[in-house]
Image: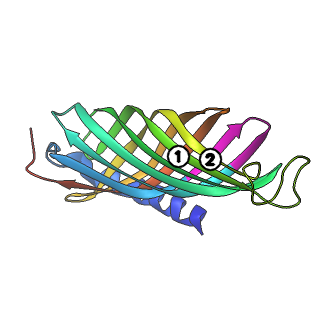
Amino acid sequence: MGKRVFIALICAGLITAGPLRGAAQDQVPEVEIFAGGSKVWTDTVGTHFRTHGWGGSITGDFNRYVGAEMEILKYSGYSQDPPAFANRYSLLFGPRFTYRGTRGVTPFAHVLVGATHGAQNILPPFPPGIIPNTASALKGGMAFTVGLGGGLDVRAWRFIWVRPLQVDYLRASFPNDVQNSLRLSFGLVLHVGRPKR
């Protein structure tokens, strides 16, 4: 289901890109609001796991090329070795850089820093030394997080844009664990506020 939606959004973005080439130069909105889904692959100490979830961001544009972004993420999933269920919540801030030289298409890049709250519940069968319903089976904490990445927005209709793909590298430094993640996101973007030139 998720894969079909992802492919449909990419196709929609490519189809709408063509007719926009002859349109007037894109105006720069005051604020861009993004909401969409995410798939995350995480490499941590001793295991690898995949999670899915959602994300949203608000970007205030200073001019045609530079803005300030705040991003909220939530993702969860299961790992196999050891069997566990993990939840992650992230709040990140940083600059965003946008290229607006092509009508109807705006690639962007961002550098984000912030914090991630993680919780992990180890599931049976329990590995040696893990006691159910104790601190050994329930792990959590806060992590300083850095995110580097970018994506592509394609105008669909007036103030509604499609983001067929956003790719990010995330590094979360927990007290006893460093997690490196690759995240793919897609969704919709709304341009609001008085346009800037």
Query: Which residue is located at x 42 percent, y 41 percent?
Result: 151
Colour scheme of the picture: rainbow
Q: Which residue is mark 2?
A: 140
* Image disc number at residue 139: none
Task: Tell me which segment is drawn in magenta.
Answer: 39-49
| Residue appearing at x 53%, y 40% in the figure | 142
Which x, y percent locates residue 14? 41, 53
User: Residue 71 at what x, y percent from top left?
Assistant: 37, 45
- What is the secondary structure assignment of the residue under circle 1? strand
The answer to whether marks 2 and 1 mark residues whose Cβ atoms lie closer than 8 Å is yes
Residue 101 in sight: no
| Rendered image quadrant of residue 102 | top left
Please identify the residue farthest to the bottom as the structure is shown: 1
Along the line of sight, the residue nearer the viewer: 46 or 28: 46
> Dot 1: few (<14), some (14–19), or many (≥20) neighbours within 10 Å?
some
Q: Please identify the quadrant where the C terminus is shown.
A: top left
The residue pinned by badge 1 equals 117
Q: Which amino acid, mark 1?
A: His
Foreground residue among 149 and 125: 125
| Residue for point 85% across, 61% down | 124
For the stretch drawn in magenta, what is the main secondary structure? strand
Disc 2 marks a residue whose amino acid type is Gly
The answer to which of marks 2 and 1 sits earlier in the sequence is 1
Measured in 3D between alpha carbons, the distance from the residue under mark 2 to the one under mark 1, in whole angstroms, is 7 Å
116 and 21: which is toward the camera: 116
